[in-house]
Image (cartoon, helix red, strand yellow):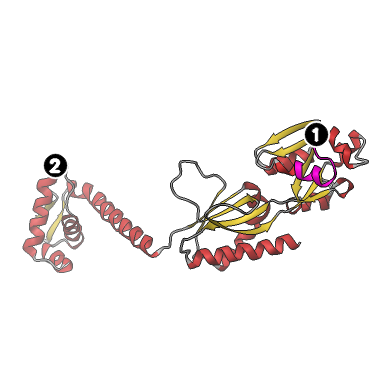
Amino acid sequence: MSHFPPSTTALRAFLAVAAEGSTARAAEKLHLSQSAVSKKIQALEVLLEATLFERGPRGVKLTEAGELYRPYAESALEQLARGRRRLEERKDRRPPIRLHMLAIVGERWLIERFPAFSAEHPDIDIQFTNYVSETEAEEPDLDIRHGTGHWPGRQAYLLFGRKVVLVAAPHLLERSGGLTSVADIQRMSYLQHFQMPTYWAEFTEAHGLRGAVPAHTVRYGYLSVVIRAAMSGLGLALVAKCFVRDELESGALVNPLELSVDSALGFWLTMPEGREHSAELRVFADWVRREAALFSSE
């Protein structure tokens, strides 16, 4: 038996004869000559080394081998048709917009708002990630970053996050005797996101404590973990106020002595400069900026 697959024309001829019970009717259905259909069937039988049809008084019918082979022929043509449809769909579909963002931005802001955008723009495909490999060749279309807003080769639009507050769990303050002055923070453990080390320096500078160091510093890789650690009473934390509004309102966290700092850093929407951006990307970027303005004003 040959390892080469049969032609699609041979498979269609085989299935047409099986369905019609006649090479003449199958030829008419396929817009081929009866001779061409017969030759395709013969070539298929040679390829498979099996007799697929037997002729009877009422026409041709499948042999046992033909009955066995029929569902596989049907499946093969269906898979090929499905593959063609997928390729056609791919031609019509616009490439997705790839958005990279810090995890806290998705967890505490974007994801809960995104269904409204998706419902309004179901044809715009947004792919989210909070991790981009250093070896990944494809650059995200949009990137929500934390910093001062200056990145070579990128346009940047401030979203939110410059108002930073000191937070702690009420039971931690009760256990430690509370804070009677800003200087008391030096005897506490400080919870820090490893990518946001400047908050402490900004805060102590703003409150006349330049050079002060906390009793102990614990660093975490995710800001959401910093917030959870603060709620668990593991130490004080400096966090963008917009991300802990719910905890402050519920009392799970408090802002002792209403201590805060206006940071030079914030969360920015960035995109590559010098690149022609699609209409879909501009629609999404404008929506992100509008939603961010509402969020920062809450």
Instruction: Name the kind of residue labelled 1 in the image.
Output: Pro
**Viewer-nearest residue: 292 or 70:** 292
**Viewer-nearest residue: 284 or 262:** 262
Q: Position of residue 130 (x, y in %)?
A: 57, 47
Q: Is residue 57 visible in the rendered structure shown here?
A: no
- Mark 1 residue crowding within 10 angstroms, few (<14) / some (14–19) / many (20+): some
Instruction: Name the kind of residue labelled 2 in the image.
Output: Ser
Q: Position of residue 295 (x, y in %)?
A: 71, 60
Name the residue tied to disc 2: 2
Q: Residue at x 41, y 63 (%)?
A: 93
Q: Earlier in the sequence, mark 2 or mark 1?
A: 2
Question: Which dot, 2 or 1, sits closer to the camera?
Answer: 1
Q: Which residues are magenta?
A: 201-214
Q: Residue furthest left?
A: 35
Name the residue tied to disc 1: 214
Q: Residue furthest top?
A: 216
On screen, residue 261 versus residue 129, left or right, reads right
**Viewer-nearest residue: 117 or 135:** 135
Q: Residue at x 72, y 40 (%)?
A: 226
On screen, residue 191 versus residue 178, left or right, reads left
Q: Residue at x 65, y 66 (%)?
A: 290
On screen, residue 85 versus residue 148, left or right, reads left
Q: Position of residue 33 (x, y in %)?
A: 9, 66
Residue 192 higher or lower than 11, as above or below: above
Q: Quadrant of residue 25?
A: bottom left
Q: Secondary structure at mark 1?
A: loop
Q: Is residue 23 visible in the rendered structure shown here?
A: yes
Q: Quadrant of residue 269?
A: bottom right
- Mark 2 residue crowding within 10 angstroms, few (<14) / some (14–19) / many (20+): few
